[in-house]
Amino acid sequence: MPAGDGPVRTREVYATVIEVLLRDGVLTQEEQRLATRLAILLFQKGNDLKNVPGEIYNSVIAGDLVDGGEIINKNQRMDIYEEMFETAFVNASLSHDEMAVIAILRSSLRITDKEHELAIEVVKGTLEESDDPKLLQKVKDELAGAIDLVGGIFESLRTKR
């Protein structure tokens, strides 16, 4: 996981998430979707999207240290966190592994409690603007539980630091 000091970098964040996804030895379709979405958000320069995610995945599998990458500023980190939270929540019923990804992503991107709450409000607003009544009902039924579970996982990560 990226250290608490110094800049937050793309390669380190992606490697941390891949480590969590591979923790149980199974990469589900939903987890692959999250990894792909994160890669799209992190690696937008040149051929990075084509090459870097696979290189990082292979390094994680081999147990090699992954560091470096582009520096992610605070606004970019918030945008990434909001996008990933929405992607995880909207496109699938959240498994424990997917919740862990969101929690580790929050930690890796150094999202504060206040920023986390702001991101949730943004996601709620986006989802409530949806014309899909099933999606809106899902938001009302499941978002609070998902937020609580992600928060609990995040708190356990915070206490380990």
Image (cartoon, helix red, strand yellow):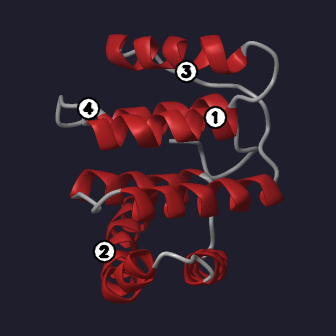
Q: Amino acid at mark 1?
A: Ile
Secondary structure of the residue carrying numbered label 4: loop
Secondary structure of the residue carrying numbered label 3: helix
Q: Residue at x 43, y 82 (%)?
A: 133
Q: Earlier in the sequence, mark 4 or mark 1?
A: 4
The x, y position of residue 118, in whole percent, is 66, 81
**Numbered disc in front, either 3 or 1:** 1
Q: Earlier in the sequence, mark 3 or mark 1?
A: 1
User: Up-down: is 14 above or below 124?
Assistant: above
Name the residue tied to disc 3.
53
Q: Earlier in the sequence, mark 3 or mark 4?
A: 4
Name the residue tied to disc 4.
27
**Numbered disc in front, either 4 or 2:** 4
For the residues labelled 1 and 2, the Cα–Cα distance comes to: 26 Å
Q: Amino acid at mark 2?
A: Leu
Name the residue tied to disc 1.
40
The x, y position of residue 7, in whole percent, is 76, 44
Q: Residue at x 40, y 51 (%)?
A: 101
Q: State which quadrant residue 137 falls in.
A: bottom left
**Numbered disc in front, either 1 or 2:** 1
Looking at the picture, tell me which residue is in the foreground, 137 or 148.
137
User: Up-down: is 25 above or below 128?
Assistant: above
Q: Earlier in the sequence, mark 1 or mark 2?
A: 1
For the residues labelled 4 and 2, the Cα–Cα distance comes to: 21 Å
